[in-house]
Image (spheres, rainbow, N blue to C red):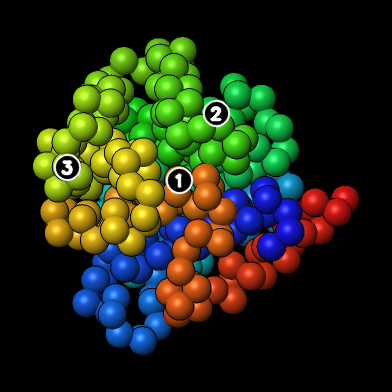
Amino acid sequence: MGNPTLSKVEGCLIGTALGDGLGEYPYIWDSDKPIPPTDDTVMTLALAEVLFKNGQYDPQKVAEKYFELYKEGTLTKIGYTTLKALERFEKTKNWFYSGVIGERAAGNGVAMRIAPLGIFAFLKKVPIEDFYEWVRWEGYITHRNELAIEGAFAVALGVFFALNELPKEEIYRKTLTLLKDFGMESPLKWNLSQIPNLLKEATEKALPTLGTSGYVVHTVASAFYLFLKEEDFLEGLRKLVKVGGDTDTVGAIYGALYGSYYGSGKFPNRLVERLEIKPQVDRFVGILKNFFEC
Ligand SMILES: [Mg+2]
């Protein structure tokens, strides 16, 4: 792929799909079976498609798309909060009232699908305040919870800075600084700030300290850790699967950060070709090519 940014955007989506599919179904790794997506990949691609089709972020259109996929039965292994939110959307038909409120909504359902907003903010040079507001709105569709939104903002920023060609340490440092600038002194920021010390430890030891559950504080910190520590994507993913937890979502976010940083060429072709959603990624990259030529 000639254009380096296009390769990074493609890498972000392929990384999401590989981390998600192989994180969820590790027993198919060494087979030649197709690698299916779960909700992480399906919702990420849906957000990407709606964003670039409309040329702006419209949460109502995004919510309608998620609902359509849910009704079709395309969303597999969906989280509890997202399921409740989609049921609420069925009644209200309004994105602003669909998100679930409360502590139980501090899951990773927004962070797992947010990467395209980082891509969009980068390509369209969106001001940081608007970027943050859109992440918040995206959160409101399913998780009306500050930690869920903050975790998503951290991931979107990570993707955004990776597309900006910054070194890994800078991506991490700038993400943390922006969380602070937006007043987010939370358990998530605290967990993320443990990472530099843990980089000296073995990954198998560090991940349980950060946590790998579906609690967004755990998920996002572990995904950032893997991105900063592991240069070989599959090696990192294998270690994650060995530790266990919400491996499809940690894997999906790790893959999004990794692919945005290295580009699509860094993933083994033999695996990329097995992705069930590869034609959809190709279609999206085709649309983006026009964007670059405009
Ligand atoms: Mg999933």
* Amino acid at the residue labelled 2: Glu
Answer few, some or many: residues within 10 Å of disc 3's Cα (few below 14, many 20 plus, some between 14 and 19). few
Q: Note whether 280 is above or below 91 in the view shown.
A: below
**Residue at x 37% of width, y 56% of height:** 233
Disc 1 packing (10 Å; few <14; some 14–19; many ≥20): many
Identify residue type, mark 3: Ala
Tell me if 281 is positioned left or right of 267 in this view.
right
- Using the image as rendered, state which of residue 90 and residue 143 is in the foreground: 143
Q: Which mark is residue 202?
A: 3
Alpha carbons under labels 3 and 1: distance apart = 20 Å
The percent position of residue 190, horizontal first and vertical second, equals 25, 21
Number of the label disc, if any, that sits on residue 133: 2
Q: Is mark 2 within 8 Å of ligand 1?
A: no
Q: Nearer the viewer, mark 2 or mark 3?
A: 3
* Point 43% across, 38% down: residue: 155
Residue at 12% over, 36% down: 209
Tell me the element at label 3.
Answer: loop
Helix, strand or loop at disc 2? helix
Q: Could you tell me residue 270's position as x and y percent?
A: 45, 78
Q: Nearer the viewer, mark 3 or mark 1?
A: 3
Q: Earlier in the sequence, mark 2 or mark 3?
A: 2
